Image (cartoon, rainbow, N blue to C red):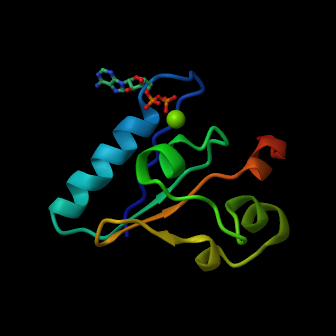
Amino acid sequence: MRIISLTNLKGGSAKSTTTFNLAGSLVEAGFRVLCIDIDPQKTLGEAFFGVYAGENTLSSVLINDSMIGAAIRPTSFENLQVIPADDGLKGIKS
Ligand SMILES: Nc1ncnc2c1ncn2[C@@H]1O[C@H](COP(=O)(O)OP(=O)(O)O)[C@@H](O)[C@H]1O
Ligand SMILES: [Mg+2]
């Protein structure tokens, strides 16, 4: 398993766009991809994938030690899953 992290404090620097397109390219190349969106702006999950956080959210994983597997959501693309961001992430400071 490889982990690729796309981070930049500056908004509008193409993090979400790059993540979405890189994920698609990797799936096309035969990889299985899990995208994890930690930005409570929620662009990747909601705007790009059309996937909303369910009852089990990433913030509950980080705050309450919930099982991360329960936060994984399918997308309309084969071999491409996402953990969408959720409002609870706004309260988490680095
Ligand atoms: N390669 C690119 N060329 C032109 N516009 C881009 C490119 N990548 C992203 N954008 C645009 O820049 C804006 C910000 O991108 P976004 O991925 O939402 O940034 P971030 O996630 O860093 O806030 C969006 O309007 C997006 O369409
Ligand atoms: Mg973004």
Nearer to the camera, 94 or 13:
13
Q: Residue at x 21, y 52 (%)?
A: 25
Residue 5 in the image, given as x and y percentages of width and height: 46, 47
Residue 20 in the image, given as x and y percentages of width and height: 36, 46
Seen in the image, is 17 located left or right of residue 26? Answer: right
Query: Which corner quadrant holds the N terminus?
Result: bottom left
Residue 33 in the image, given as x and y percentages of width and height: 35, 65
Nearer to the camera, 22 or 53:
53
Q: How many marks?
A: 0
Residue 22 in the image, given as x and y percentages of width and height: 29, 47
Residue lying furthest left: 29
Seen in the image, is 66 located left or right of residue 37? Answer: right
In this view, 17 is above or below 73? above
Q: Residue at x 79, y 52 (%)?
A: 88
Q: Residue at x 63, y 52 (%)?
A: 85
In this view, 49 is above or below 11? below
Seen in the image, is 54 located left or right of residue 13? Answer: right
Q: Residue at x 63, y 78 (%)?
A: 70
In this view, 75 is above or below 14? below
Instruction: Kindly indicate the quadrant of the structure image that contains residue 42.
Output: top right
Residue lying furthest front: 50
Query: Which corner quadrant holds the C terminus?
Result: top right
